[in-house]
Image (cartoon, rainbow, N blue to C red):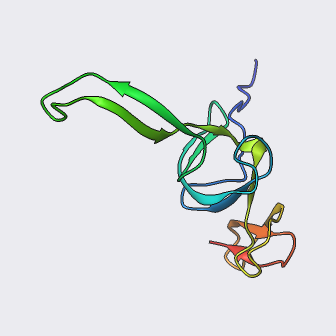
Amino acid sequence: MSRKINTIPKLHIRKGDMVRVISGDSRGKEGRVLRVIVDKQRAVVEGINMMSKHSKPTQQNPNGGIIRQEAPIHVSNLMLLDPKSGKTTRIGRQRDESGRWVRVAKASGQVIK
């Protein structure tokens, strides 16, 4: 009898988190996570990794043209900002009083969201 192993990775970043880019073209920029793509381990961050998309004229956009939008960035290039100090921090997991797992900032020990 074989057991099914959960292959979906546990990510340290969630939608709504404030993050800083630690490598790549957008290094040093900060933004809020808009969307997380778990199976590809990528996140879309507000104002980071902007790309140009050419769109044909449609009924909603009769002129068409070039649209600037955020492209996904790998989560290994992002680091969460500590809610207390505003600096980057690593993430740990601890159980709270009710026994649920919560994310904890390693730098300050403060519970994140």
- Residue 43 falls left or right of residue 24: left
Left or right: 83 in relation to 35: right
Relative height, residue 82 to residue 47 (above, below):
below
Which quarter of the rendered picture does the N terminus lie within?
top right
Residue occupying the far right of the picture: 107
Residue in the foreground of this view, choosing between 20 and 10: 20
Q: Position of residue 5 (x, y in %)?
A: 74, 29
Residue 98 position by quadrant: bottom right
Q: Which residue, as the protein is rendered here, is positioned at the far top?
A: 1
Pinpoint residue 6: horizontal percent, then vertical percent.
70, 33
Q: Is residue 28 above or below residue 88?
A: above
Where does residue 89 sit, x and y in percent of width and height?
A: 82, 65
Quarter of the image where the C terminus is located: bottom right
Horizontal side of 4 relative to 66 (left or right) equals right
Count the numbered circles shown: 0
Q: Dividing the picture into quarters, in which one does residue 28 lie?
A: bottom right
Residue drawn at x 77%, y 69% is: 104
x, y percent for residue 86: 74, 75
Relative to 30, say whether 95 is above or below.
below
The residue at 80%/65% (across/down) is: 88
Identify whether 28 is placed above or below 98. above
Residue beneath the point at 54% across and 52% down? 47
**Residue positioned 38% across, 25% down in the render:** 54
